[in-house]
Image (cartoon, rainbow, N blue to C red):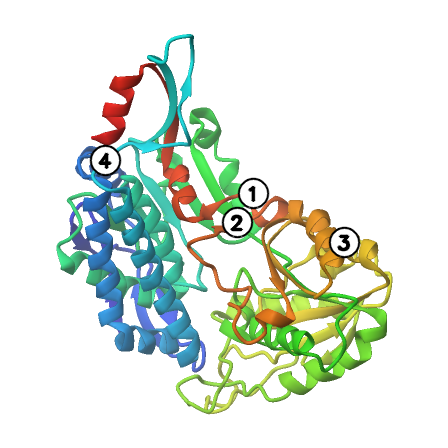
Amino acid sequence: MASLQSYLSGAWTSGAGKQNVLVNPSTEEPLAETSTEGLDLAGTLAQARAKGGPALRALTFEQRAEILKRLAKAVGDAREELIALGIANAGNTRSDAKFDIDGAAATLMFYAELGTKLGTTRILADGEGVQLGRSARLFGQHVFLPRQGVALHINAFNFPAWGMAEKLAVSLLAGVPVISKPATATALMAHQIAQLWVATGALPEGAFSFVCGGAGNLVSLLTGQDVLAFTGSGSTAAMLRRQENLALHGVHVNVEADSLNAALLGPDVEAGSDTFNFFLGDVAKELTQKTGQKCTAVRRIFVQADRLSATRDALMERLADVRVGNPADEKVTMGPLATAQQLADVRAGIDRLAAKAKLLLGGSKAVEGLSAPIGKGYFVAPTLLEAQLDTGADHPAHTHEVFGPVATLIPYRDTPSLVSRVAAGGGGLVSALYTDDRDVAREVVMGIGPYHGRLTLGTQKLAGQAIPPGTVMPQLLHGGPGRAGGGEELGAQRGLALYMQRVALQGDRALIEHLLAH
């Protein structure tokens, strides 16, 4: 069994004491073990502040971009090796693993290209400057400067490659060193990527550290120039936010948490139309890709009451073709959940929904996975439920996220009732509206936009060529209000703001413009 190490203060090192065991979720076979017990995490933080930060800040955006290009190439060159690790440790099908790995490489390359465009400066202008007096010489300009601390990235289990890469790409380009801590259960792929990145020699001393296992006391050591970027459950996020030092020092905290994302079928869309089939294809993909273990997966499906029967039948027909099992078998189209705890949580969540909704497909019963040992594996069937018309805002479909291949069909009467029910989710990362009626689109966007970080709009003209709503694009913001954590990541240049301080410069225009150019 492999022993996974952490990369701290420029060296690979192993923890002592009790080991965390990583398993194959299809067979429950142990694959590796790791621990951070006894490791000098405080020393790593100090080294990142003392060495990594100054080294990165000394580089121009263009020079930081060259680092990202080399990291992206390292991921792309190891694609097949990483796919195998995703199948073994994360329960990914080959397609799911490629989605994760390719997303990581593409996001790194996107920010590399952005850095090249930003050029040879180290200061980032924020909008246009403004004349402050009668003379054009007295000038004001908002700028962004890199924070002089460390970015602690605590990542979720579902995207060991993409989740780590997207945070790191933005932080390094902004000029802030990274301490990356993947979720332990699926860390095999992240560990291999970290080894690849270190081996490139592209990273300045202290610019990158990798914590494989528990985070220890790292969060409690953060101070005012540091950033905490967390992806995970809302309950864990709330616990982190209560850390005294985060409030005392005003640590910049970004959270991506639970999200009851929705797919909305407009009242104008007829069954069998191109827009209807577009909607069906996206819903089926978002329900089953990564076994529903995506922060952007569809949890609620809204359909006008008179379209409910046709939609129900069409969705059940598509989901009936899903083959659940060990993704090492190429015939399998949906793998297991990532951990035994995830399986227990998803089963309990299905039962909670089924107490208030009709179970149409799947359920919480044990599933024997194709090509898996009998009685082994964390398998669950694609599960579809149906709520009653006029279901209230307190229905569990609006209050509880089941992090698996589970969604609830919810009928609605009219557009105002649709808006109110979607908003009952309390804030989401992304929801998708499928309509060819511009008035419906306007009413829905105005009504549910404030509850979301991103909305996708599907029309007949986009059918067959749109990017599915669950795909996080580096050009657009990722995050959402309320339940979704209140954070914002990515969004092209906007993402750099998380790791930089906005400063208003006031003074001689020629001097300010000189600073911006150098």
**Residue 121 shows which numbered tag?**
4
Q: Is residue 19 left or right of residue 433?
A: left
Q: Is residue 342 left or right of residue 38?
A: right
Q: Is residue 403 visible?
A: yes
**Whole-percent x and y of residue 363?**
68, 78
Residue visible at 60% across and 65% down in the picture: 345
**Whole-percent x and y of residue 16?**
26, 55
Label 3 or label 1, whichever comes before in sequence order: 3
Residue visible at 54% across and 51% down in the picture: 257
Q: Nearer the viewer, mark 3 or mark 1?
A: 3
Q: Inspect the image, locate mark 4, and give the three-letter code of the amino acid beneath it.
A: Thr
**Whole-percent x and y of residue 170?**
34, 47
Label 3 or label 2, whichever comes before in sequence order: 3
Task: Decide which of 281, 239 is in the foreground and name it.
Answer: 281
Find the distance from the CA under tag 3 to the CA under tag 2: 20 Å
Q: Inspect the image, locate mark 1, and give the three-letter code of the amino acid beneath it.
A: Gly
Q: Inspect the image, locate mark 2, and give the three-letter code of the amino acid beneath it.
A: Gly
Does 146 appear above or below 230? Answer: above
Find the distance from the CA under tag 4 to the CA under tag 2: 28 Å
Task: Decide which of 468, 320 is in the foreground and name it.
Answer: 468
Circle 2 residues within 10 Å: few <14, some 14–19, many ≥20:
many
Find the distance from the CA under tag 3 to the CA under tag 1: 20 Å
Q: Is residue 92 visible?
A: no
Q: Residue beneath label 1, please?
A: 486
**Residue 495 shows which numbered tag?**
none
State the image quarter where residue 251 is shown.
top left
Label 4 or label 3, whichever comes before in sequence order: 4
Residue visible at 85% across and 68% down in the picture: 388
Circle 3 residues within 10 Å: few <14, some 14–19, many ≥20:
some
Asked if marks 2 and 1 touch (Cβ < 8 Å), the reply is: yes
**Residue 479 shows which numbered tag?**
2
Q: Residue beneath label 3, please?
A: 419
